Image (cartoon, coloured by chain):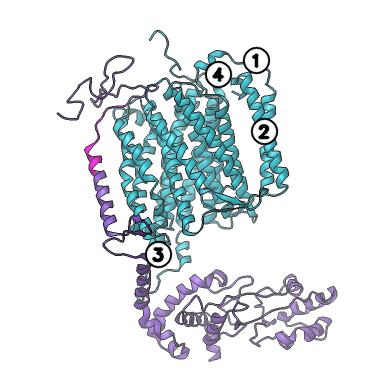
Amino acid sequence: MSDDPRLNPDPDADHEIDAHTGHLEVDPVTGYDTTGHDWNGIRELNTPFPKLALWAMILTFVYSVIAWVLLPAWPYGKDFTRGLLGLDQTEMAVESYRALTADRSDWMAKFEAGDFPALQADDTLMLPAMAAADRLFQDNCAACHGADGGGGPGFPVLNDDYWLWGGDPETIAETLHVGINATGDDTRFGQMPAFDWMERGELSALADYVTALPQGNADADSEGGVLFADNCSACHAEGGIGGMENGAPALTDQAVIYGQDRASVLETLRRGRQGVMPAWSDRLTEAEINLLALYVANLSKDDVEGQQ
Amino acid sequence: MTPAGTLSRNERQIAFGLSVALSVLGFGMAAFAGKGVMAVHGAMALILGLFLVFRVGGRLYEGAPGIERHDRYFDGPTRFGVMMTLVWAIFAMGIGVWVSALLYWPEGTPALPWTSFGRLRPVHTTGIIFGFGGNALIATSFYVLQRTARTRLADAISPWFVLIGFNLFCLWAVSGYLMGSTQSKEYAEAEWYADLWLVVVWVVYFTVYIRTLARRHEPHIYVANWYYMAFILVVAMLHIVNNLAIPVRWNGADSFTIWAGVQDAMIQWWYGHNAVAFFLTSGFLGMLYYYLPVRSGRPIWSYRLSILSFWGIVFFYIWVGSHHLHYTALPYWVQTLGMTFSVMLLVPSWASAGNAIATLNGAWHKVRDDATLRFMFVAAVFYGLSTFEGSFLAIRPVNSLSHYTDWTVGHVHSGTLGWVAMIIFGAIYTMVPQLSGRETMAWPRAIEWHFWLAVGGTLVYVVSMWNAGITQGLMWRAYDLNGALSYSFVESVQAMAPYYLIRTIGGGMFLTGAIVCALNCYATFRSAPYMAEPRDVPLRPTPAE
């Protein structure tokens, strides 16, 4: 006997007779009888369970049982079945991290010491290393300094000749290590204090002087010039030429990161400035920091060459 | 048809009392909170309550509708639900197109807090899942329940309470996000008092469903009702457990979830995935199992497959949430269980997709000619595709490529656009002429336009996101010969630009189709004769039979 109702048309089987018509209805398209119910015109066919679906289901069950045997799967009490493969995802993650590190250790190790002139001279090393450094820069630095190191309002430009703390690889590496106004004790520290105690007229005169500095027509004997000499030159150097590598910018070169138009200068004078660069020594390895230092120094190649 | 027009005097008095209670609740919330999001939400409830007080109160002593109404189905709430479905569709799909455009033009939004991506995105998801999907589910469930049980809804107040209360929940949720209020649980961002309110609404929903089912004039319960009941019952369980939280103050919106750490993540994805399972699948299968055979005029191909599918889905789905947390702090064994149960879920899911397609045997000429039936056919196909994709993506090594990429977004939208929205539109185009006492929609040709916009939009969207996701996944795992990453993260973002643009176009096409649908429904309802009777088989068999 088959379980296919087409071959076994028994009205007394486990399906019901249609309440309205009193006989079993057979669907002309499929040849199957209906279950005998009618809901708002909807009927259901008594089609047997397709063999294909049954086998597909068994296949998924077999897959699952194999997975349960091989992998960590079922909990019991405070433990769980470990699986025949004995896999542990923490170990696997650490292992694959170690494998990746080992993979690049042959050339990465050379950057750990930070002998920059020797590294820069080695072209076969620098070529692939700078490609890797580019990704490091994009992933860690570009969010503030721009993809090309072009900076942005409040964030220093790295691809020009102007530096606040110095642009040679050693100094850049140091900046990367400790950060600027960062959380560590050895951080670089730089603050432009707020000159909010100054009179309105004094601020205005000072702003006139500072705005005029890049144009080269600033008058040192004006009220603003005198105020500058008394209050600003200790950090920005006499005449605002900077170059003291203390984080205070030169004011004569149109490269001030907060802007040197009158409104920006007044804002800086009234409220002060204290930008932050985080320290990277906890997040990047020694080799990665050195790699980045070389990369950033290269962004302003002219500057590096000028110093040599 | 107004609420009052179909209510007896006694029912109008109860409705009046509930409206007063809602006004008092709203006033209390606003006064108690004083300021902030909760006060605004209290004011919203107060305004809605007062509107209903005047709406019902003005007709409190008008004549009662005739007793013969008990021989008819009670479709006023369904009509309202269909309208709200379309309102939410246009609103939330519009926000969806906006946020997708922001991924291509990040600056293309005013610099206001409420127009930031982080606030708009949950407005899109909540508006679609709850506003669009939820209203469609509730509206169709009342329609299907009455017809398959051959009985009128158990009472006239509860269905209105459920629909109005549910829409108040959606409004609270969405307006809260815009004001920056969220409990930071994906797809459950609404704050604690909105969650409590939804529990009340949901208990009333379940009660009216069960009471109506108990009055049925059919000996057996049709399978669609099983799916709808699973949706109502399990969503209640998921909602309550996931949203357990302790308010910071009773007069403020902020709260802390009681879950912590990896348990919180597991509960969140147990909820999140079963929102897909029981909100976006089970209830919509109920819809499919009613409207597809009705529209095609064909019997369900296999009663047995529909039962296998029901119990398979109910049993297996509840285990699979952990596949959202592969390669995380979640223990490996939980991940294995989530993966294997996802794979075992495939056949029960395909049982319904296959059953729906086989049901169309003998009606393929109708699929060719009738865009409404074609919507439902495409829905079944996309249901099959996205459940296969879901089981596939749940396999751990596959997930290592797809996770955190736009492939996930593509997968979700193949389910929501291709399956959920398509079956809703199929149901609407079947039901709206019926409810309006008409043979067809007001503009039958517009259904054809909508169909091709929807299918085209879905394909453009899903294909672009597949490309985007696989590209991202491959870029993130690529290393060069020196063992360094081949691409920085931002390069993988830049590579997405063309796909994001194409995706926005696809979403725009789908939105255009939804607008056409809403206008068509509006025209159909408008052209219906006053107090139109549904064109239905009679509620009770005529004595002659």
Q: Chain of mark 2?
A: B
Query: Which residue is labeled 3 in the image?
Result: B475
Q: Residue at x 52, y 41 (%)?
A: B130
A54 within the magenta span: yes
* Tint applied to chain A in the drawing: purple
Task: Give the residue number, with chain letter if any, for mark 2.
Answer: B21
Which amino acid type is shown beneath numbered disc 2? Ala
Name the N-terminal-most of marks 1 and 3. Answer: 1
- Name the foreground residue: B289 vs B225: B225
Q: Which residues are magenta?
A: A44-55
Q: Is residue A81 visible?
A: yes
Mark linked to residue B63:
1
Q: Residues within 10 Å of mark 2 (few under 14, many from 20)?
A: some
Q: Residue furthest top?
A: B544
Q: CA distance from mark 2 to mark 1?
A: 24 Å
Q: Which image quarter holds the N terminus of chain A?
A: top left
Q: Quadrant of residue B351?
A: top left
Q: In whole angstroms, how far apart are the C-alphas of marks 3 and 4?
A: 60 Å
Residue at 58% across, 73% down: A151
Question: What crowding class fits label 3: few (fewer than 14 Cα within 10 Å), some (14-19), or many (20 or more)?
Answer: some
Query: Which of the two marks, 2 or 3, is nearer to us in this view?
Result: 2
- Per the model, the C-alpha gap separating discs 2 and 3 is 58 Å
Chain letter behind tag 1: B
**SS label for mark 2:** helix
Q: Secondary structure at mark 4?
A: loop
| Chain B pictured colour | cyan
According to the picture, the residue beneath numbered tag 4 turns out to be: B529
Q: Quadrant of residue B292?
A: top left
